[in-house]
Amino acid sequence: MSSSNLLLVLLMLTAGGYFLGRRRAFVLAGTSGRGQQTLHSRPTYYGALAALWCALPALTVFSFWRFFESSVVTQMVIAGLPPDIQNLPADRLSLIINDIRNIVSANIVPQEINPAIQAAADHYTRLTAISHATLAVLVTTIAIAGLLWVQKIISPGLRARNHVETVVKFLLIACSTIAIFTTIGIVLSVLYEAIRFFKIVPLHEFVFGLDWSPQMAIRADQVGSSGAFGAIPVFMGTLLISAIAMCVAVPIGLMSAIYLSEYANKKFRAVAKPLMEILAGIPTVVYGFFAALVVAPLIRNAGMSLGLDVSSESALAAGLVMGIMIIPFVSSLSDDVINAVPQSLRDGALGLGSTHSETIRLVVLPAALPGIVGGVLLAVSRAIGETMIVVMAAGLAANLTMNPLNTVTTVTVQIVTLLVGDQEFDSPKTLAAFALGLMLFLITLILNVIALVVVRKYREQYE
Amino acid sequence: MNKYSRNDATGKNTLAGKNHTSTKAAAASTMDIVNQGLSRRYNAEKRFRLYGITAIILSMVFLAMLFISIIGNGYTAFQQTFVKLDIFLDPDTIDAQSLKDANYQGMVKQSLRDMFPEVKTRRDKRRLYAMISSGAAFQLQDFVRKNQQEIGSVIQLWVPADDDVDMLIKGHIPRDVPEIERRIKDNQLAWIDRLQDQGRIEKRFNTTFFTAGDSREPELAGILGAVSGSFYTLIVTLMLSFPVGVATAVYLEEFAPKNRWTDIIEVNINNLAAVPSIVYGLLGLAVFLNFFGLPRSVPLVGGFVLTLMTLPTIIIASRAALKSVPPSIREAALGVGASKTQMVVHHVLPLALPGMLTGTIIGMAQALGETAPLLMIGMVAFIVDIPGGFTDPSTVLPVQIFLWADSPERAFLERTSAAIMVLLAFLVTMNAVAVFLRKKFERRW
Amino acid sequence: MKKVLIASLALIFTMGLGSGWAASRDYISIVGSSTVYPFATVVAENFGKTTGFKTPTIESTGSGGGHKLFGAGVGVEYPDITNSSRRIKKSEFEKAVANGVKEIVEVKIGYDGIVIANSKKAPLFKLSRKDIFLALAKDVPSGNVAGKTVPNPNKTWKDVNPALPDVKIEVLGPPPTSGTRDAFVELAMEGGAKKFGWIKDLKKKDKSAYKALCHTIREDGAYIEAGENDNLIVQKLDANKDALGIFGFSFLDQNSDKLQGALIDGIAPEFDAIADGSYPVSRPLFFYVKKAHVGSIPGIKEYLAEFTSEKAWGDDGYLTDKGLIPMPAAERKKFRQAVENLIPLSASDL
């Protein structure tokens, strides 16, 4: 039977097991003196135990079997092929196997089919059918066996609840490991492809090279770019735009946080804070659209009227809008930190006769400084990793310049340009995107760790 | 009067005897110095306050600029220009057996020729036909299918105008530029004016925008495909990330022993929350598409990638919610004999649930607006059909906005802005619901 | 140890459930050229609306990228049709055959000109192919000494040809995945390079050196590769008056209110000039179909019929409205027959 039917049968057995186990517990309890109080756990736990013993071993066997099924069957089918096909070189053999698999799954196949291959395909189908049937029988048997075994061991003294709780705990651990796997998955996948890249292009050329023209020829007889992968212009572009963004976001964010937490009255805060949160919730693609449509032409026209040579995709436009996006980030982080400064410090300063602004400048801000620095670092890492605004508003040409009126490209734009539409994982072009992704990940990781360390280390002064 | 007071019962300064003059002089000069600096310091105070207010006002101005430019560009998209045509349903060309094959485009063109019989040259005729959308033929086909009894008579049908005519009627194409720089030629202008005088041009609510999928023709393009795609993707994300996120938070907060490992895991999760979204896209590309071989452009894979992205947000919010439940509740439960699991599931979890829900809603709102990771997994194809399930190819609303933003037609500009308005409406609603829930269920222990 | 065990169990569990992914697709999957993309999308939309089949999904990957994906194998996970703004190369064909894609049907859909355009607000450029070569090549001949080249020193158009405006050379063009790029370097750059006698002789002596000289485009920032999104180039030209863009005629035609095409060798890029061949930079557009997929993926034959119908690619068809230059009637008939009988391409045709 098909696997979904099998899973359905398993589900029904599990449900049945639950009810049977529970009923057995009631039965065992009801006859003797104190009724349910003789049972160690509530009856529902006995049912749950039965259900778990029915489902879990069966599911484990099912997964293992399915995981290894296709490779085992393929090996057996290859062994059954005529010897001349078996001895073909590896890539031809894999083509043949592909054909066999396609025939089996009623996929598209090339027209003429070798009778030996057709026979092999039939063999494959037969083997798969046998495997599925065996699996079905095995799984059902294990499920029923588990059920019956639990029925047998159910007794008033059985500590069903403890067993069930242990299983629940393991399930929770399994869920937690998914979060860990995500990190490992990111690191491994990006690292693996990046290492393949660094075998083709040496690391020092990537990190220190000044020439970025990655659009290499994709065919042997084509002439493309020279395939220079020096990433410094790209990093400089990211740096420039992030610097502009921080110049906008930090003063405005910090000052608005200070005003909101120190000076504003309740009504003002009740209006301003939600508005800031709206600013934070706007998707970055909208910011990108706004930057490309409104801000860039505005800056260009302003620059032209002043006689400056402004590119239509200036770093200034992208940096400005990115700064606007980060303002609520800086503001809310600073707000939390400033509020955490004990009131006694402020009172002491005020008591000595300082004005409110002097208190803030000389007492509160230095006290909150580690937190603010941590927040700013997090904002920087956000700016570095931002994609959509720069894809829509920044340029594609790798330009090594510090002039904000020129056009530059960033790491994220290059990743998108190199990967959209291309699926081949062998060319240096695609792998270069992974190498850039690795750099991005490492830099944001380092920034976050520094932020965390700074905050943790200096925060304890006021606990 | 205590012993520390300088003044005696009469209020005179008792210590003023010794060094009286110098202290008084010194005190006077200190006070003078202080008084002189006072106005400067008050001014500094006022300036500081001003900076603060300026900062907030600047942020509000930016927000206002954003909204005004988007809404200003987009509100006209909710109306579409329609033209009333008199179409003769020629019984010779329509075969009742195969309604599909009749030349509806030809009938529309004939109707235009009948209205403007003076148009002769091929070039002018093409300009005439270009004023009506190509979707008119399909609309006519639908009409005939539903009203087969009308075959043989002349019907009046309101059909959508071409996007250039639409832009002209809405005033986006200036009439005073030289003809070469205009998309609407002079003779087309004359015809449009005539149609308007005859009362055959009308602006109606643009239902196509909400009921159609993507299209190459702006007047036929709509966001339903993208909205359905977003919907399916979000459902996959919610169903995967909420249970796993809550389970992880519960384990880490309640059951995990407090040792180095859990410390590392906590740092790990905080870092994941700050990883740029495009790296998740790379992960999705390398693992889901390349290794597992899942199909491109389907909400299922998009949901997987977005789950990985929102997990850290949900975990962090859930942990904060669990931490806020006071220890007294936990100890009380343990005191009446509950086991640890029972305590968590029956007592702590229900109390922490509002906080967890708030975090989840905020995470979902972030996932709704994400574009970069979905670009990597292929959702940039031209897909017209409305997806019917989780494995149908589709795109999501932010990606649709991104794709439309590249199109040069003026009509797509206003539709992109309108789509942004729809997206923002969804997001503001979700955030408002989250804030409302947080306020309503907030309990001060 | 126990936790590691549970973790690995969890992993295998999820992978076990995930393997054996069903292979089935009931919509046509098309990849390829960004120049053919506007035409293919219109046909696909019409096809979807008039027949009961699902609308094909179309990705714009560039002709080269499209051929790579198309030729990777036979099966539902590979695309059915690839659009191409140049003919398939012999190496691509052989690679496809080696991967099991043995029968490919070639369909020419019409002609397209490659234009160099800029914003209407800037002065009109009158270029010759020699100017284009001298402006964009990586190495240009030095003086008139045969065989000697220097890295391209020209910074402004005036350096290339004193009759041209004194404007910085800034050209937005397609990357190597694009068929437009291939056609451009072959027709415009090579055409201009051949005006130098010694380069023309080099073709017979050392073909690969000749190709390297003619086809390599400069990388010092004057030529910017703008991705497979020609619409983006159009937008950037509107914002930047000094830049020029290289793309297909259809994009110029659809945006004629904002852009103007430069004259090449004295001929303006207009419909009739391209149709009768007098405009020197024009090429045919194609798409390629896997015969093995016809019948397994529903609707391919009907899509082909729609594309090759007179109302689509005829002289008055809707594709012509979009800027496609139709083939002569005899050629149309020939390709319609090839489509109806699904006559595959053979290596000797290339």
Image (spheres, grey):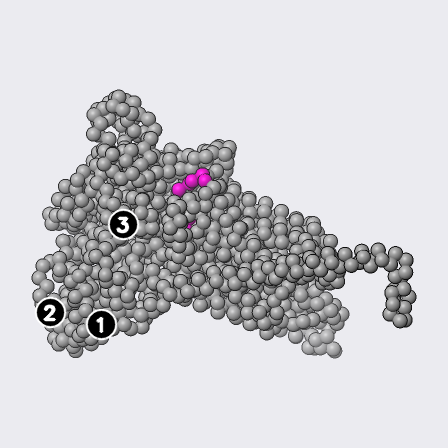
Identify the image quadrant of residue A403: top left
Circle 3: element type: loop
**In the displayed structure image, the side of residue B252 where residue B59 appears, left or right:** left
Kind of residue sitting beneath label 3: Lys
Residue contact at pointers 1 and 2, CB within 8 angstroms: no
Q: Where in the figure is residue B251, as x and y percent of width and height?
A: 64, 59
Q: Where in the figure is residue C51, as x and y percent of width and height?
A: 24, 62
Kind of residue sitting beneath label 2: Asp
Instruction: Look at mark 1 in the image and give the residue it sits on.
Output: B201
Query: Which of pointers 3 and 1 indicates the residue nearer the eye?
Result: 3
Magenta residues, start to end: A393-401
Counting the numbered discs, the total is: 3
Kind of residue sitting beneath label 1: Ile
**In the displayed structure image, the side of residue C311 where residue A91 appears, left or right:** right
Whole-angstrom CA distance, mark 3 to mark 1, is 33 Å
Q: Residue at x 18, y 44 (%)?
A: C268
